[in-house]
Structures are given as structure tokens and as C-alpha cells.
Image (cartoon, rainbow, N blue to C red):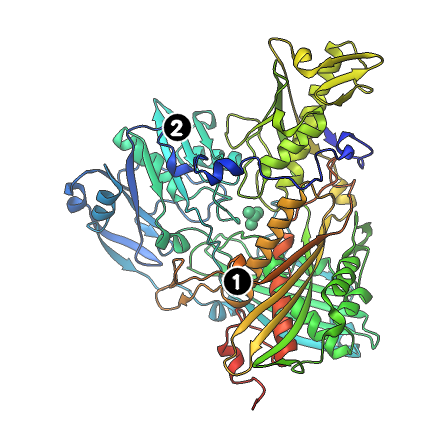
């Protein structure tokens, strides 16, 4: 069905199951270790072999010679797959660099060989014996240096695509005349997804048919790209990914593990398992690219913005794409004169790509410090400053209203709840050795909708089985899909079975861009409407009047249990939800306010996050328990971005030095004593029949700036270069006795 007019009353609004805090239906399997992850598919791929990936030891150049004889002769080794014996490979449309390189090398740790052996240990030992001579070429590894040659990128037409530049009114003129103004430059570093489960695949050939059990957020994209890379018809490839140990955008696309496992399995004629070795992941796969961002804002004396400009520079491999860090600045605040621009430099570092809230997450790291600085300059409380500059329409296209926008309510609710009134002037609050401060930032992330299909079956036991190729990357998708089917069919969660993550199932929205929750459940809604109609017609009932409740259907004095209605053969329905142009007529976004309290050690500069609060407005919250977990996780990740995370670039050799979980530290939930999440009670009928939006990315947006602003409030020291480590504070801390 097509969604092209705002939703009216529908069965989801009954809220018998939807909207209630619900435990994860897959929780018991995960906590008992019976939910199989990609690397663990011993059941389906017996007698497996093991592959270990060899990554390139240079960032740019070519392989002059490769000697694999010693590796091939090592105990247990079955094959060494390289570009020389892999056959002709294509390239998926979502990969900038090749997933098996040679002789050209495009980035450090790009895969150049897969050693396949009887055991993992044998493969690992033999991989050490592959001898490679390189012919290294000079590359560009420093964004600071490459920035001067950066050019406007080509317009991106993908989901959330955004033009390289926008101009409204006369920014320069208005900025020159502004009563109060700021002009600052901020930097954000390269970051890694650092998900728990490595990229992993088990590959099996049956004749010319390939099945891969792999960790991937987007089944249909992955299937298409794998077919393209291996020059196979898409129908010959099956991709299965029912459980995923975190993705954060790092598993949106095909990676080397799956291509190499497939090639290896072909060569040895047995299943091959490949898990990218942890120290390889950060250079071999994608990362969130570093940015340099210049922000200029001018206001009237009363704080109203008259001019706002945001320029961002980032780098990527040749043919790559920019970090869209200016995206939110086109939408978030009012102001008649506006200018945003992205510039892309060519870098020979590993491929930059999407990581949780690409664009907005690093963009708000800069913008929301700038807003704090601007508010201070104008002498206005930062919560009030944001309220003064609120807009209910797209500021670049005023004829487009927001479908719904309650940013100010998020901020005011948060201020009350957090005790914002107690905030002092910078550097004024002292508790023992701690300098204490509070910070605020707005959260903003667009709401994207994606076509999504599902199949639902009703069987003779009255059980509803939902099938779709949707993925659950740890977000709780299984549960909200079960809730949707239970609500639609009038059954309890115990009567719903959910099967996900298999390319044999109807093509879903997949998990990306925080569109998965709303879009995939909308597809299930569409399929369930069809099933309701089948059931009702079979009973001679009017489908529009039939009431589905308590495992039965009733209408006009007739009634039947769903089990009886299904009959011996059961009933099955399939449909998809597609979207018209409501997202063009209306700007659809999600909103929040982040509040943070930090303590900074007055002597050592050590920073502790003491309290955090997020107030979010994101349409109907389908499962408040899972949504709260999503936002808490995102807040924690935002603290990592503020204080810890940075891939250190070796600018001479062109690689990320701290490329494992020991060198690349991330905070965990337990590092922050108090985290609270509040959702405003709302529905957005313009987003879908679910009236929901996404929260998984909203939660990280603005967090790092709120931390930065709290550090400034605690110490009076403004740091504009992330991460905010103690060395950036120490020399500037107020002298204390
Ligand atoms: Mo997301 S960065 O689209 O997984």
C-alpha cells in the first residue's frame, strides 16, 4: 500500500501492545547463547575451514611481489586466495575501495589475501608467512594539509542526500551588519564504530548457489553488492543475518569478510568462516571521517539570528563522499540569511562512511558549541536562545512546514527536570577538588522513511508468523515487529513468531539512518491489513468493521477464533508500505534536548560526567523500554565522542595507529552514574500509519556539545577540538589553591 496522506485512526492506535514497555522477545536466546551469530553457524555449514585476512602494509602504491609458497606449505593450509587466483571481480555500488586489492593498494590494511586452513590457529600462523614487497607511493594523509585543495563534492542522491552548498538571502551582508557575532572553527576526529561483534561471515557453496551467514544491516543491498562483486546473478546469492552484534553504520555495506569467505569457500570446496581480526577492522573497514568546521553566526541584540554560515571540510578516498556535517544547520534554527557548504579533500586514509547519525552527529558537535558561544555573546541563557530562534518551517524553504517540531518543549522540560536554574556563571561552582558545570545542546536528526515489505501467516494454532528481511542490530526490532503484528491481529505476544534477516524473505527497509523502526513496522502493518481482510472475508464479515481481539475476530453477531479462521492450511498475506511525497511537503525530523553535568578536577583536569538527561520528541514510541535503551546507549556513545574517541592518524604512513579496542577507548554505561531519558508523548501522523519516527540516532546528536558546554561552564575553558582530553584543559584551568 502507499502512504501518501496523513494517517487517521487505525488499529495501532488501540495501544494494547504498541507503546508499552516490553522485554525483548529475543532476549532469552541472546542471554543463553542460543541466538547464532554469523561466525557460529556450525549447524548449517558442517566441516568448516577458517580464513584469516592479510591486510596491506602500505597505504598507497602497489604490490611488487607476493610470495605465498611458505604459507601454502604451512600445516593445515588449504588455499591462499589473492587477486591473482580469485578470478575477475566486480565491485558493489556501495564500496569506494576494492574489497580484495592487488596489485594496486588503495588504503592501509586493505585486504590483499585470505589464508584458508583447517583451523583458525593454522590460518593465523600461515598468514604471518605471506611475504609481500610493496612499491609505496606518496599519499595524502592529513586533512589539515589537504583542506586547501578540497572541492565541492557531487550532490548525493542517496537517502538523506544533500546538495554540497546552499545560500538563502545575503549572508555576508547580514553578518557584516549583525549587532553580535561569532566566528569559530571546530574540529572533530576520525572515529570508529567499535561494535562488539567483528565483521564476520560463514560462506557455503551448493553448486553455483552461494549462501552467506554474515553480519549486515541491509540484507538486500548486501545481496545485490555481493552478486555484483562476484559476477553472479542476484538469485544465486542468499544472505542471512538474523542476529547482529552492533553495526552503527559499519555494517551497512558489504565488507571484505563476506567477499573473501565466498572466494575461499569456492577454492577449497568447503564452507569458510572469516571474522575480520579486531586489529584489522579500523583500517580495513569504514570510519566516521574527521571534519574541520567553521561557523559564523550574527544576531540582533535580542538574540534573533540574522545570519548563519556553516562550512565543513572532510576527506575521503578518490571517488568517496563527504561527511554531511552542515545538514542540520540548514534546518535547525531560524534566520533569513544563510550559507552552508561542504568541501571534500582527497585523502588516502581508509574509506570514510556512515557512522551513527552521519552528518548530524559531527555537525552538531560543532554547531551546538557555536550556539552556546553565541548565546553567551548575546547575554542570553542558551535554552532561551534556542527558543528565540525556533522555527516551525524549513528555514530554507518556508513553504514546507515541519510535520511536527517540539524542540522548545524538549529543552524547557529538560531544563525544569535537570535543575538548570542552579547553573552558575563559568568557573563559579566548586565542590572540593571538583569544578562543576552544566551544559545543554539541542538534538536533531532527520526522519527518513523507506519502502518495506513483509509476509504474515496465520496458522491453525492461531499463531501469527511475520517474515521480512529486516535486521535487528541490537535495537529491538524483533520486539517492535512482534508488537505490531500482535496489535494488528488482536493476539498476545506469545502468539507471534518473527523471522528476520534472510534474503529469501520480503525486502524490508533494513537498519540504517534510524528509519528501521518506523519503516519496517509500517511494512508489517500493511501486510497485517491484508491478512485481516482475508480472515474477515473468509468468515463472511465486513473487513472494515471486523474487530480483532483476544485471539478472535467478531463482526455483526458473528465470531470465530483466529485458529479456526485460519483453517488447516492457514492463511498468508504479503504487502509492502511505500511512500508518496509527504516527506517533500513536510520536513520530518526528530528532536531532543541533552543536559549534562560534569565535574572537572581542578588540579589534574580529569573530567567526569556526573549526570545526563535527554528529553526526546520522536513521534510515537513503539516500545519505551527499548527506545530508552537506544537513547542511553547513544548518550554513552556521545560521551565517547566528547571525551575519548579519536583514531590517531600516522600522517607519514597513512593509517590509524590505535586500531584495536585497547587503543581506541569507548565509555560504557557504568562510566556515567546517572542517565535519564524522557520521551514527550506525541504521535506524528505524517510519518507513517505507525505515527512513529526513529530514536537510535537522535540519541547521540548533540550529546558531545552538551558535554563540551558543561566543561566550559565548569572551568571557563572553551575547547573547540574534540576529543576534549585533559591536556587541552590543563594549562588553562583557573589557578586554585
Ligand atoms: Mo546508520 S550510520 O545508517 O547505520
Mark 2 or 1 closer to N-term? 2
Residue 169 image label: none
The image quadrant that residue 121 belongs to is top left
Q: Residues within 10 Å of mark 1 (few under 14, many from 20)?
A: few
Quadrant (top left/top right/bottom left/bottom right) for the N terminus: top right
Classify mark 2: helix, strand or loop. strand
Q: How many marks?
A: 2
Residue 541, above or below 141: above
Q: Which residue in the structure is indicated by mark 2?
A: 210
x and y percent of residue 330 in the render? 71, 59
The image quadrant that residue 293 belongs to is bottom right
Observer-nearest residue: 31 or 448?
31
Does the beta carbon at disc 2 come under 8 Å from ligand 1? Answer: no
Quadrant (top left/top right/bottom left/bottom right) for the C terminus: bottom right
- Nearer to us of marks 2 and 1 is 1
Left or right: residue 159 compared with residue 371: left
For the point 50% across and 46% down, the residue is: 246
Classify mark 1: helix, strand or loop. helix
Q: Which residue in the structure is indicated by mark 1?
A: 671
Label 2 close to label 1 by CB (< 8 Å): no
Observer-nearest residue: 450 or 150?
450
x and y percent of residue 636 in the render? 56, 58
For the point 31% across and 32% down, the residue is: 265
Observer-nearest residue: 69 or 348?
69
Left or right: residue 360 compared with residue 418: left
x and y percent of residue 459 in the render? 61, 16
Residue 638 in sight from this viewpoint: yes
Residue 88 in sight from this viewpoint: no
* Label 2 – label 1 distance at C-alpha: 44 Å
Observer-nearest residue: 710 or 95?
710
Residue 182, above or below 701: below
Q: Residues within 10 Å of mark 2 (few under 14, many from 20)?
A: many
Amino acid at each position: 500500500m502507499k502512504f501518501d496522506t496523513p494517517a487517521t485512526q487505525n488499529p495501532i492506535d488501540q495501544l494494547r501492545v504498541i507503546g508499552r514497555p516490553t522485554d525483548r522477545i529475543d532476549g532469552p536466546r541472546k542471554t543463553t547463547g542460543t541466538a547464532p551469530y554469523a561466525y557460529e553457524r556450525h549447524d548449517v555449514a558442517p566441516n568448516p575451514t577458517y580464513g584469516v585476512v592479510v591486510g596491506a602494509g602500505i597505504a598507497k602504491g602497489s604490490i611488487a611481489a607476493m610470495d605465498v609458497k611458505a604459507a601454502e606449505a604451512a600445516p593445515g593450509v588449504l588455499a591462499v586466495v589473492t587477486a591473482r587466483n580469485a578470478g575477475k571481480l566486480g565491485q558493489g555500488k556501495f564500496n569506494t575501495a576494492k574489497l580484495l586489492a592487488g596489485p594496486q593498494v588503495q588504503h592501509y590494511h586493505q585486504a590483499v589475501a585470505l589464508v584458508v586452513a583447517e583451523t583458525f590457529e593454522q590460518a593465523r600462523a600461515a598468514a604471518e608467512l605471506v611475504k609481500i614487497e610493496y612499491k609505496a607511493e606518496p599519499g595524502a594523509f592529513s586533512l589539515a594539509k589537504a583542506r586547501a585543495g578540497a572541492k565541492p563534492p557531487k550532490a548525493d542522491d542517496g537517502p538523506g542526500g544533500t546538495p554540497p552548498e546552499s545560500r538563502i538571502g545575503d549572508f555576508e551582508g547580514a553578518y557584516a551588519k549583525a549587532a553580535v557575532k561569532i566566528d569559530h572553527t571546530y574540529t572533530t576526529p576520525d572515529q570508529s564504530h567499535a561494535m562488539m561483534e567483528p565483521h564476520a561471515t560463514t560462506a557455503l557453496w551448493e553448486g553455483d548457489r552461494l549462501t552467506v551467514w554474515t553480519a549486515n544491516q541491509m540484507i538486500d543491498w548486501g545481496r545485490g553488492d555481493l552478486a555484483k562483486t562476484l559476477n553472479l546473478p542476484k538469485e544465486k546469492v542468499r544472505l542471512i543475518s538474523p542476529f547482529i552484534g552492533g553495526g552503527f553504520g559499519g555494517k551497512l555495506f558489504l565488507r571484505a569478510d563476506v567477499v573473501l569467505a565466498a572466494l575461499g569457500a569456492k577454492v577449497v570446496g568447503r564452507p569458510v568462516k572469516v571474522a575480520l581480526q579486531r586489529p584489522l577492522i579500523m583500517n580495513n573497514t569504514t570510519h566516521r571521517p574527521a571534519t574541520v568546521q567553521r561557523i559564523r553566526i550574527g544576531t540582533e541584540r535580542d538574540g534573533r539570528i540574522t545570519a548563519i554560515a556553516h562550512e565543513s571540510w572532510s576527506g575521503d578516498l578518490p571517488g568517496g563522499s563527504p561527511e554531511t556535517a552542515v545538514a542540520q544547520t540548514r534546518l535547525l534554527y531560524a534566520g533569513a540569511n544563510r550559507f552552508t557548504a561542504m568541501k571534500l579533500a582527497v585523502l588516502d586514509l581508509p574509506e570514510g562512511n556512515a557512522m551513527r547519525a552521519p552528518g548530524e552527529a559531527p555537525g552538531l558537535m560543532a554547531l551546538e558549541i557555536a550556539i552556546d558561544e553565541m548565546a553567551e555573546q548575546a547575554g542570553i541563557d542558551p535554552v532561551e536562545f534556542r527558543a528565540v530562534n525556533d522555527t516551525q518551517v524549513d528555514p530554507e524553504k518556508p513553504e514546507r512546514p515541519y510535520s511536527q517540531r517540539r524542540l522548545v518543549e524538549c529543552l524547557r522540560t529538560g531544563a525544569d527536570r535537570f535543575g538548570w536554574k542552579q547553573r552558575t556563571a563559568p568557573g563559579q561552582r566548586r565542590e572540593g577538588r571538583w569544578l562543576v558545570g552544566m551544559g545543554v545542546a539541542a538534538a536533531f536528526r532527520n526522519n527518513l522513511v523507506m519502502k518495506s515489505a513483509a509476509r504474515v501467516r496465520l496458522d491453525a494454532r492461531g499463531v501469527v508468523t511475520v517474515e521480512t528481511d529486516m535486521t535487528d542490530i541490537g535495537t529491538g526490532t524483533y520486539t517492535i515487529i512482534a508488537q505490531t503484528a500482535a496489535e494488528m491481529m488482536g493476539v498476545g505476544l506469545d502468539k507471534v513468531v518473527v523471522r528476520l534477516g534472510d534474503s529469501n524473505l520480503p525486502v524490508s527497509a533494513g537498519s540504517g539512518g534510524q528509519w528501521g523502526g518506523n519503516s519496517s513496522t509500517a511494512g508489517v502493518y500493511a501486510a497485517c491489513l491484508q491478512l485481516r481482510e482475508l480472515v474477515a472475508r473468509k468468515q463472511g464479515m465486513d473487513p472494515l468493521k471486523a474487530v480483532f481481539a483476544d485471539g478472535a475476530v467478531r463482526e455483526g453477531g458473528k465470531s470465530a477464533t483466529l485458529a479456526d479462521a485460519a483453517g488447516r492450511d492457514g492463511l498468508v498475506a504479503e504487502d509492502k508500505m511505500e511512500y508518496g511525497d509527504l516527506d517533500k511537503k513536510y520536513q520530518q525530523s526528530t528532536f531532543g534536548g541533552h543536559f549534562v553535568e560534569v565535574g572537572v578536577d581542578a588540579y589534574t583536569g580529569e573530567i567526569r560526567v556526573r549526570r545526563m538527561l535527554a528529553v526526546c520528541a520522536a513521534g510515537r514510541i513503539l516500545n519505551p523500554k527499548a527506545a530508552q535503551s537506544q537513547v542511553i546507549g547513544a548518550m554513552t556513545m556521545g560521551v565517547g565522542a566528547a571525551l575519548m574517541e579519536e583514531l590517531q592518524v600516522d600522517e607519514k604512513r597513512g593509517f590509524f595507529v590505535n586500531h584495536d579496542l585497547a587503543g581506541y577507548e569507548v565509555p560504557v554505561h557504568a562510566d556515567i552514574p546517572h542517565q535519564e531519558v524522557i520521551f514527550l508523548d506525541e504521535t506524528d501522523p505524517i510519518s507513517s500509519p505507525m505515527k512513529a519516527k526513529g530514536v537510535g540516532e537522535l540519541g547521540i546528536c548533540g550529546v558531545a556539545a552538551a558535554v563540551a558546554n558543561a566543561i566550559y561552564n565548569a572551568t571557563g575553558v572553551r575547547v573547540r577540538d574534540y576529543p576534549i582530553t585533559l591536556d587541552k584543559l590543563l594549562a588553562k584551568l583557573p589557578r586554585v589553591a
